[in-house]
Amino acid sequence: MKENVNTRLIFNDKSKYLIIGVGILIAGGLFISTLLLNINTPFICTFAGAKYDPTSTQLETILHYATSRVTPQQSQAEIRLSFDVLKARAPCNFLVFGLGHDSQMWHAFNPGGTTLFLEEDPKWVETVLHDAPFLRAKYVKYRTQLQQADQLLQTYRSEPDCNPTKQVPLKQNERCKLALNMLPDEVYDKEWDLIMIDAPRGYFAEAPGRMAAIYSAAVMARNRKGSGVTHVYLHDVDRRVEKIYAEEFLCRKNLVKSEGRLWHFEIASVVNSTVKSDLFC
């Protein structure tokens, strides 16, 4: 009986702390959200949705990760690179290549902003959205294969429409095989403040590989018309294709931070620049 009493007391203490903790989270979330939505400063990206309830979504996210044994693939140190920028820039436009166990986390890090996920597996889109219907994800069918990576890298310069000085819109670019011209219109209609490349799959020959995602992210960043740089994050840089394509299109000179298998680039717009080059780097 004494053991049961002690157990009950411990449980009550834990419940009390849990309630206090949740209350602090709610209050903090409301305060931060209100602050973000009322500050008018160039460091804050364009507000993307007046009906969004960040507190509710963030609490759903806390519940999800608190009751799940599945954790994001990126390490805490890797996540911190994009979290720090999102914390300063949100609400903003955040494009994520890949839909996974970390998607609710990325969505929660951008309260009030637009976070869009691009996924190659339609069944996986249905699975994830069934458990998290508040996420915005689109199915994308890629037109490349990993086994083509070396050939595409060798021949893209001979295709005029791949030349960055031509500024051929991605959506209209049929000839450049590295251009993602089949994405949802929303991708082309928005300017993305952050782009995370953690997909599509790139670990077997017939997989789409990330060649086109890296090239297209570089094009989006270079063609940005708004102020500020575009933050591009590339995961799995320990793999050969990711590394050589990053160095070809995202450029070592733009690499500002790295952690584990993640590289963080800051790419400035060249639309209004007087310096024109037929090379990305």
Image: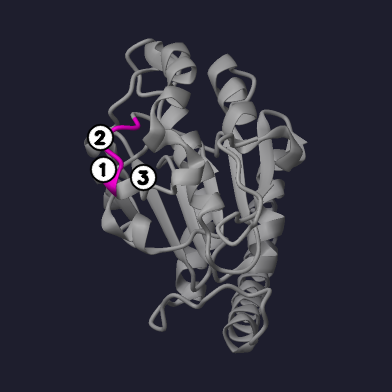
Q: On the image, numbered disc 1 is attached to which residue?
A: 182
Q: Foreground residue, 95 or 71?
A: 95
Q: Which residues are magenta?
A: 172-176
User: Residue 106: image x %, image y %?
Assistant: 53, 54
Locate the C terminus and report the quarter of the image it occupies.
top right
Q: Residue at x 64, y 53 (%)?
A: 1
User: Residue 222: image x %, image y %?
Assistant: 55, 51
Determine whether the residue tagged by mark 1 lies in a helix, strand or loop. loop
Relative vertical location of residue 79 with respect to residue 70 in this rendering, above or below: below
| Amino acid, disc 2 | Lys
Within-10-Å neighbours for mark 1: few <14, some 14–19, many 20+: some
Q: Residue at x 26, y 37 (%)?
A: 174
Q: Foreground residue, 87 or 21?
A: 87
Determine whether the residue tagged by mark 3 lies in a helix, strand or loop. strand
Point out which mark residue 118 bears: 3
Q: Residue at x 59, y 77 (%)?
A: 26
Relative vertical location of residue 50 with respect to residue 123 in this rendering, above or below: below
Q: Foreground residue, 95 or 167?
A: 167
Within-10-Å neighbours for mark 3: few <14, some 14–19, many 20+: many
Determine whether the residue tagged by mark 2 lies in a helix, strand or loop. loop
